[in-house]
Amino acid sequence: MTEYETILVEQRGRVGWITLNRPQALNALNSQLAQEVTAAAVAFDTDESVGAIVVTGSEKAFAAGADIKEMESMSAAEMRATDHFGSWSDFAAVRTPVIAAVSGFALGGGCELAMMCDIILAADTAKFGQPEINLGVIPGMGGTQRLIRAVGYYKAAEIILSGRIMGAEEAERAGLVSRVVPASDLITEATTLAETIASKSLPSLYAAKAALDAAMETPLAEGLAHEKQAFAALFDTVDQKEGMAAFREKRSPNFINQ
Ligand code: CO8
């Protein structure tokens, strides 16, 4: 496997794990880490032996934001020219379902990274926020767009305009987090969820994720048309025949990911 310096990468069964590992900076996302996370996610995405990816951090921090020290001296022209953090769009585009397992701080770019994932599982210690306004900037990795879609305009506006940080329970009530679990159970719960997802047929997982993405990006009629096509296309897969035969025969399906 490729050598990485800012992350730990491991495959356990059909689940690919990416652990952010810059403890000295609370996993702040610098450009090296952005490239490494994206490269690792894309490598898992092109490997048929991986059916789900988990991104996690440490107990204290999922990620405390983009690396402020790396950005501080940049000019607007430099920021535009280097497309600083541009590689995150490749991360957001992976076809494989991605779970963010969040403990501690998920602030700024950290919250935005979690929102690029499909499911956010939170430890009861998790803290979510977009504090960029305190630094004289605004969210730059999708926060203004994805937080609104997750929690609605008014809640997102309060969080982004004031920089207030939400606890895990509030984030769950708001719809940002799918489930809050005790911090000591976070990795076990993420493992169980990821293994459950990874046991399904890959073509249907890819189709489901693409349809969910379409719902975020298109008007209802277009999204429904996308779903109808994708649903029909799955009837040409071996796994659809197997899944339905297994139901009829009252047994578990043996998917071959075709
Ligand atoms: N960047 C760089 N270093 C950081 C960051 C960060 N975001 N967060 C923490 N660190 C470093 C600290 O500087 C410190 O290092 P050192 O020991 O060398 O001084 C170390 O991590 C530990 O941090 P603290 O001592 O501050 O730990 P505390 O427990 O006291 O506080 C906090 C934890 C509250 C999380 C605090 O560290 C903090 O407020 N961090 C910054 C949070 C923040 O503002 N995040 C938003 C950053 S901006 C952003 O994410 C924009 C995203 C879009 C970019 C897109 C570009 C195109």
Image (cartoon, grey):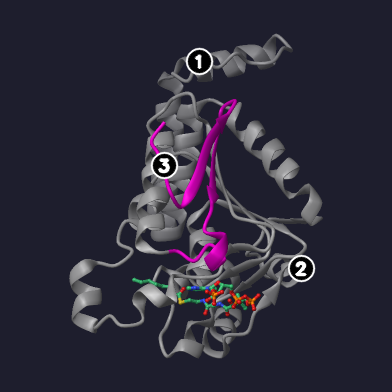
As drawn, is 199 to the left or to the right of 239? right
As drawn, is 3 to the left or to the right of 245? left
Q: Find the distance from the CA under tag 2 to the CA under tag 3.
A: 31 Å
The residue positioned 43% from the left and 30% from the top of the image is 232
Find out if the beta carbon at label 3 lies less than 8 Å from the nearest ligand 1 atom.
no
**Percent position (x, y) of residue 247?**
68, 17
Q: Find the distance from the CA under tag 2 to the CA under tag 1.
A: 39 Å
Which residue is labeled 2 in the image? 169
Q: Is residue 215 above or below residue 154?
A: above
Which residue is labeled 3 in the image? 40
Q: Is residue 57 above or below residue 165?
A: above
Packing grade of label 1 (10 A; few <14, some 14-19, many >=20) is: few
Packing grade of label 3 (10 A; few <14, some 14-19, many >=20) is: many
Which residue is labeled 1 in the image? 256
Packing grade of label 2 (10 A; few <14, some 14-19, many >=20) is: some
* Magenta span contains residue 33: no
Image marks 3 and 1: residues in contact by CB distance under 8 Å: no
Q: Which residues are magenta?
A: 1-29
The residue positioned 69% from the left and 15% from the top of the image is 252
Q: Quadrant of residue 114?
A: bottom right
